[in-house]
Image (cartoon, rainbow, N blue to C red):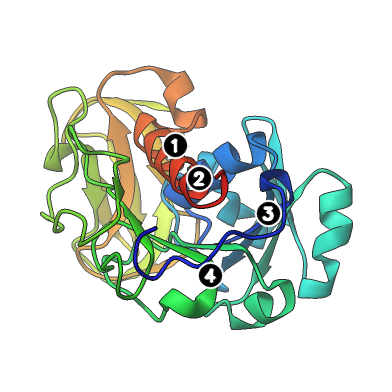
Amino acid sequence: MKKGIQTKSKKSVGELVVLIRGAGEVASGVAHRLYRSHFKICLTEIPHPLAVRREVAFSEAIYEGKKEVEGVRARLISRPEEVVSVWQKADVPILVDPDGKRTKSFLKPDVLVDAIMAKQNLGTQVHDAPLVIGLGPGFTAGRDVHIVIETNRGQQLGRMILNGTAEPDTGIPGEIGGYTMGRVLRTMKKGIFHPQKSIGDRLEMGSVVAVVDDFPVIARISGVLRGLLREGVEVKKGMKVGDIDPRGKKESCFTISDKARAIGGGVLEAVLYRFNR
């Protein structure tokens, strides 16, 4: 057994409680995969999430009260004590709890997954649960988490790391359809975000996708609009506000990405590695 991983739980695998910090695109892909594998899932989020791929992010439930992604529904609750009642309805509970401490204290989860994707550790510790998993750079397996899952696109995507760290953040988006930087929409001005297009719309290079106050956000490539921030969000200069898929398939805007599924598979492998003995 690897250093830092505690002894086997008396629970069966299907009884395990998994607390996931974050509910953006990748966190939602992880939650979806674990839910389909019959684990008890709970999500925590910040008060004003800034997910770009909103159609596949359970964080939208923070604004709308509920959000369904590929047949799985997350439901907003206000207190950890409501978690069980949501599980009984076969939904995934999500609540605002930025540091996750209130929910962790109540649930005493068997597994904690830090899926914030902040590229740094914002407070997760190895003793937070019998199994603590960190997604991507910022975590060290065997020190602040038990297991790290690789999040960088490529040969190692979704790999379970038992010692050491994930690949460092390159600052360059993963390649899709031959494009990297060009497919990401960023604003060059601080202000209030106003979309001019909707997720799923087809775009031509040069299209005005949104405005920040009166400054346009322009598509640098053609494709379908896969992700876009909500109306009225306050943004900073240089912030990612949208995502274009150059492959042009509208259905990709409303389904979990290959990357999120692979990372979800890595988390599932880590949970089984720890408990299915």
Precedes in sequence: disc 4 or disc 1: 4
Q: Cα distance, mark 2 to mark 3?
A: 15 Å
- Residue 39 picture location, percent across and down: 68, 46
Asked if 39 appears above or below 20 in the picture, the reply is above
- Residue 179 picture location, percent across and down: 14, 31
From the viewer's perspective, is the residue at label 2 or at label 3 nearer?
Answer: 3
- Disc 1 + disc 3, Cβ < 8 Å: no
From the viewer's perspective, is the residue at label 2 or at label 4 nearer?
Answer: 2
Using residue 66 as the reference point, say whether residue 48 is left or right of it.
left
- Disc 4 + disc 3, Cβ < 8 Å: no
Using residue 140 as the reference point, say whether residue 70 is left or right of it.
right
Asked if 150 appears above or below 115 in the picture, the reply is above
Q: Amino acid at mark 2?
A: Val
Image disc number at residue 16: 3
Give the residue pinned by disc 4.
Answer: 48
- Residue 241 picture location, percent across and down: 33, 53
Precedes in sequence: disc 2 or disc 3: 3
From the viewer's perspective, is the residue at label 1 or at label 2 nearer?
Answer: 1
| Badge 3: residue crowd in 10 Å (few <14, some 14–19, many ≥20) | some
- Residue 175 picture location, percent across and down: 16, 33
Q: Cα distance, mark 2 to mark 4?
A: 21 Å
Give the residue pinned by disc 1.
Answer: 265
Give the residue pinned by disc 2.
Answer: 30
Precedes in sequence: disc 1 or disc 2: 2
Q: Amino acid at mark 4?
A: His
Precedes in sequence: disc 2 or disc 4: 2
Q: Quadrant of residue 37?
A: top right
Q: Amino acid at mark 3?
A: Leu
From the viewer's perspective, is the residue at label 4 or at label 3 nearer?
Answer: 3
